[in-house]
Image (cartoon, rainbow, N blue to C red):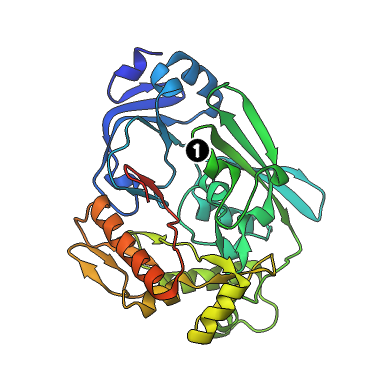
Amino acid sequence: MNDALTHASARLPGYRVTERARLDARNTFGIAARAPMLVEVADTNILPGLFADNAMLRDGPVLVLGGGSNILFAGDPEGVVLALTASEVRIVDEDGGSAIVRADAGGEWHALVLWTLAHGLSGLENLALIPGTVGAAPIQNIGAYGVEVRERIHAIEAFERATGKSWRFGADECAFAYRDSRFKHEPDRFIVTAVEFALPRAPQLRLEYAGIGEELATMGVAGTPRPSQVAEAVCRIRRRKLPDPAVIGNAGSFFKNPIVPRAQAEALQIDFPALPAFRTGDDRTRKLSAAWMIDQCGWKGHRDGDAGIAASHALVLVNHGQASGAQLLALARRVAASVRERFGVALEPEPRIVGASW
């Protein structure tokens, strides 16, 4: 197995190895980067043996790469890049009113959403068209249009690198928070291999988020919509507001909406009455609109060479063609500095930054 990992583009049962692998097409920014070694694993059952037999995997830095939609390569990764490719989805338990759906980590997230809708299951429709893989969803605790994925997660299967042990975590063991989880805090410890979702058959629709009702009306949907219609409305909104990575490189929203003490939010709204502030699960805090603050600082549509901010959405950094990750990171830092100077609020990036620190 050690010998196999030293051969470029080696094909063996359960995994494939490529040396000096280009990553341009594996990140939605389209940034030119190379990995010393790329290991694509189609069968997660071989992970214990693979790590046990290879010191580069076991002891060196390993970057687990999903769809590349939540990563910024400010430099080349130092060690192995690992990509899980298994994508099976199946119902593992059902009681008539709901079902437990198990999905391999390597599957495409939007494809999973469509699969659940086609099988008469609801709960993920507000998360339609989010780029990335199933395994990345709980790490980031993806969320959109009033729903976070943690609300539907039943369990997480993960591989622990140091011990070779497979773990199963209930949702309450995953330390989920806004765009956060235990897996995000321990990227070098666990590799998410599969996710189980608890999904109802009777729709429990979430339509209160601004824009969904209006989009459904535009679609001509009257009365209570079907989950598939909610998903279509979300897709239409996302396509209209967010640039397509296939057309211009981007990783979606680059900054998190900052959560600040309620008193700070209320003080800011005295000086900036139009500043959107949203309730959180804790009445002592409020979530501010990063997009609004960035827009007020004049960044929407800004461009430094090929590094820029989308003209359609102030939260989205874009690569107009040949921008490097370092150039995009430098622009992001300038944006954050201007927001801090004007509003006294610190912005944090959503994507993982490789090759540099924030």
Task: Name the residue type under label 1.
Answer: Pro
The one nearer the camera, 262 or 198, is 262
The residue shown at (76%, 63%) is 202
Q: Tell me the quarter of the picture where residue 15 sits.
A: top left
- Image vertical order of residue 313 relative to residue 88, above or below: below
Tell me if 78 is positioned left or right of 146 in this view. Answer: left
The one nearer the camera, 40 or 89, is 40
Q: List x then y, in percent, for residue 210.
A: 57, 79
The residue shown at (43%, 72%) is 291
Q: List x then y, in percent, for residue 62.
A: 41, 31
- The residue that mark 1 highlights is 187
- Image vertical order of residue 274 relative to residue 109, above or below: below
Q: List x then y, in percent, for residue 274.
A: 50, 86
Q: Tell me the quarter of the picture where residue 251 sits.
A: bottom left
Q: Residues within 10 Å of mark 1 (few under 14, many from 20)?
A: some
- Image vertical order of residue 58 relative to residue 75, above or below: above
Quarter holding the N terminus is top left
